[in-house]
Image: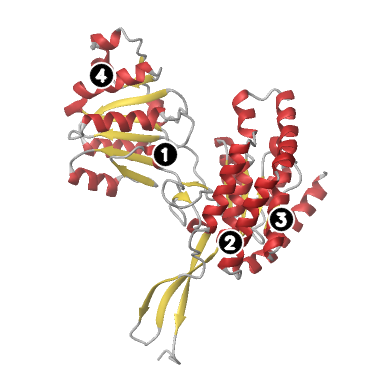
Amino acid sequence: MNAFNVSEHMQALGLQAKTAAFLMARADAATKNRALKALARRLREAGPALSAANQQDLDRATAAGLSAPMVDRLKLTPKVIETVAQGCEQLAGMADVIGEIIGMKQQPSGIRVGQMRVPIGVFGMIYESRPNVTIEAASLAIKSGNAAILRGGSEAIESNKALALLVSGALAEAGLPVDAVQLVQTTDREAVGQLIAMPEFVDVIIPRGGKGLIERISRDAKVPVIKHLDGNCHVYVDDTAEFEMALRIVDNAKTQKYSPCNAAEGLLVSAVVAEDFLPRIAAIFAAKGVEMRCDPAAARILRADDALAGSGARVVDAVESDWSEEYLAAVISIKVVAGVDEAIAHINRYSSHHTDAIVTRDHVHAQRFLREVDSASVMVNASTRFADGFEFGLGAEIGISTDKFHARGPVGIEGLTSLKYVVLGQGEVRS
């Protein structure tokens, strides 16, 4: 497509989405749930067609020399399809928050004032690789009564087109506007530039992908963006921590999976327990091939441990950049701190404000950590890997936000809504 056609295409999608958003906002819960159940059924019925479309993307990706992990992300296996189908059914089983009125209070004038939860309107979703995101975004749009314009990665275009057809069919079957969820049909990158610069049609943009993509969207968008750039998460082992619990949590937070944004990248240990705790967690890391980038105090403790010396442990001197690094790999920074004050100060300076945890038996320290750590998710005696919409009971997640306005943390149905004030009166006038 040339630039003129791309612009024309995006303007048409925007106008259709805006019109559909009005109809979605007034749809009742039963109708939206019918669409979600129909989508789940259609996903299961479309196995062969989805596999054929997906194979086109896989063949093209392999021919283009994409890495094995990147190709793996493109796969629409029966397990992936069943998972997103179940996700649609789970959303259908959840309570509908649209139209909910909260905080209704009687005022001295006689009026009653509260807030009603309403859809945002139109959200644009820009994402890479994984075609299952098409269904996750579509199902959340349906449940929250929004319209969505989806722009997936060019490497998954055939899979995304096949999935979008299933969404359109489910919307039509339930009597909802088929334009409520639209897929950008071109792989031209100009479409992204158009989508993020249409405030007359699009109310919010949600990017989901690599840091480069999110930085570009955040820099160039003319509409609000719900995003996070990095996942530099920490676990602080306090001076009262129960060691077996701390070992389980730190190990899980770092090694359960290295690539997610909620994996721990930094370990802080109170000086009171560092001599005893560090060799034990280091032995676990050494067995799993995790490189430890340590401050002088931590390095001294670990290098002096004879048992660790013969284990092949990789203990490296940390540099300043390590404290703010998101490794997404078998690497962790380790620092010995004086106590909870220094731990909080370090996290607030170096973390990406995504997820940070404390392991402690001290209630006062736990409460201070919860209040003072400036992150979207703050945890006591739990792994950072729990920072996830499904694990938080949101049913599904469209992304993670480290912003402070509107949505913060995992973004589920409520994150795709807004609140407006409603006033109920009985003829009151202001004097």
- Marks 4 and 2 sit apart, C-alpha to C-alpha, by 53 Å
Specify the amino acid type for callout 3. Answer: Ser
Q: Residues within 10 Å of mark 3 (few under 14, many from 20)?
A: many
Residue bearing mark 2: 33
User: Which is more foreground, mark 3 or mark 4?
Assistant: 3
Q: Tell me: residue 267, above or below residue 118.
A: above
The label number, if any, that marks residue 53 in the structure image? none
* Residue 279 circle label: 4
Marks 3 and 4, Cα distance to the nearest angstrom? 56 Å
Q: Which mark is residue 352?
A: 1
Labels 4 and 1: the sequence-earlier one: 4
Amino acid, disc 4: Pro
Asked if the residues shown at circle 3 and circle 4 are in contact, with their CB atoms under 8 angstroms apart, the answer is no
Residue 152 position within the rendered picture, expressed as x and y whole percent measured from the top left: 67, 43
Residue to which mark 3 is pinned: 168
Image height of 84 relative to 62, above or below: below
- Quadrant of the snapshot with the C terminus: bottom left
Looking at the image, is 239 positioned above or below residue 92? above
**SS of the residue under disc 3:** helix
Position in image of residue 256 (x %, y %)? 42, 30
